[in-house]
Amino acid sequence: MKLWRWLLLLIIVAALAAFGWHGVADDPGYVLVRLRGWRVETTVVVALVIVLLAWAVLTGLWRLLRWPFGAMTRRHRRISRQRLDSGLVALMEGRHGDAERDLERAARLDALRGPALLASAEAASRRGEPARALEALNRAGQVAPQAARVVRARVLRRDGKPAEALALLTPEADSGSLTPGGWYELALAALATGDPRRAMTALEPLQKSGALGTQRYAALEAQVLVAAIDAAPDGQALNALWSQLGKGQRRAGAVVDAYARRAAAFGLVLPAMDELESALRREWSSQLAQTWGALGGDDLDARLRRAEAWLDAHPNDPGLLLALGRMCVRQQLWGKARGYLERSLAIAPSPGAWEALGDTCVGQGDIPLAQRCYRNALALTRGEAAVELPRESRLSHPDTRSLAVEERDQHGVPRLRE
């Protein structure tokens, strides 16, 4: 397409030249110049050609005269760009001191002052020198005020001053002129100050801008919504918040889990159970199954039968096994509880399973073994290794390999292991 455009332009120029030549050939015009006894006669066409040639010659002479004076400027521009390049590379490589030095030098060129100072502030912040970062941002604010404000908020938040970062971004957030990076920093600062309601206002602009990837936005959204749910002061406020959330937001596993736990804490066990069961029907989640088993209520028999039915499709799910064990402990079915919990620990040891097994041992009257289970739960909480129980003290020796031969999909169809 570009070749055709050039050909069309040449044809048009040729046509104009042809028609113009015929007009000039009939009457080329007459130009007379007299100056101090000098007399020059010529046609209009020749005069125009002379003027264009004179303009080209004068322009060339002017540039030739300026070249020595611009050599230093060109050298300064070239070196500044090289320093900006090396400074950005050093920043990405973690050589923050070298990055700050090169970027400060690159900022001497006016055309590079804004990006160089912003990157220099980021390097100083990563070095743990917020004062130097803020000083660079003061200068960068004269060139790129919005970007400097976002970076300043990030520096303040990293320095343990999220309230100042939030106050810095709030005016632009209220006017709706905040950039995507500013909305992101606003959300993080609001979470750090314990203001999830303010953080929720940043979700819609971030989603519309597409500045964050799908996974990163989903993680931030879940973090904000979980914090908002945990901050609900009572059941009425919790239900009001839950009703305001979108359909997609209410389907996130972490959000459903947070709502169920908070609702159960306010005595709203049935709504919590309904949300958990709906989420488990949509997509199986070990964490949601574990939360479902931890809920209170008087219908433990029916819930235990339902959970045992789930076990057919998810025989190796440690969260479901832990939920079954805890429900059996509440019903004082010590043997069944111990079997489920030992199986859960054999698949994926967790502090909750060790604690529940300790409760089971207490119920069976084996206090020394219960103390060992509690110590293991505490050790896993601290990140330390747990000590296995003596083989003779175990109720059974679960073989998870035989259980893993048959697994079922969400429709209950057996899936053989490859």
Image (spheres, rainbow, N blue to C red):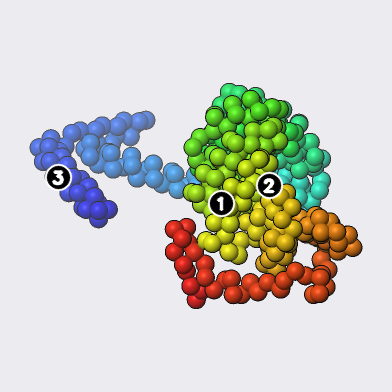
- Would you say residue 81 is visible in this rendering? no
At label 2, counting other C-alpha atoms closer than 10 Å, the crowd grade (few under 14, some 14-19, many 20 or more) is: some
Q: Which residue is mark 3?
A: 15
Choose between 206 and 153: the one closer to the eye: 206
The quadrant where residue 238 appears: top right
In the image shown, does 199 or 180 lie closer to the viewer? Answer: 199
Figure check: 16 above or below 315: above
- Residue that numbered label 2 is attached to: 294
Residue type at mark 3: give it.
Answer: Ala
Q: Nearer the viewer, mark 1 or mark 2?
A: 1
Q: Secondary structure at mark 2?
A: helix
Q: Considering depth in this image, is 96 or 412 the residue closer to the camera? A: 412
Estimate the x, y position of residue 51 in percent, counting from the top left: 33, 39
Query: Disc 1 vs disc 2: Cβ atoms closer than 8 Å?
Result: no
The answer to whether any part of residue 280 appears in the image is yes
Choose mark 2 or mark 3, whichever is in front.
2
> What amino acid is found at the position of numbered circle 1 in the picture?
Arg
Alpha carbon separation for disc pair 1 and 2: 14 Å
| Residue 309 at x, y percent in the picture | 54, 56
Q: Is residue 128 above or below residue 416?
A: above
Determine contact: label 2, label 3, CB under 8 Å.
no
Which comes before the other along the chain, label 1 or label 3? 3
**Which of the numbered marks, if any, corresponds to residue 414?**
none
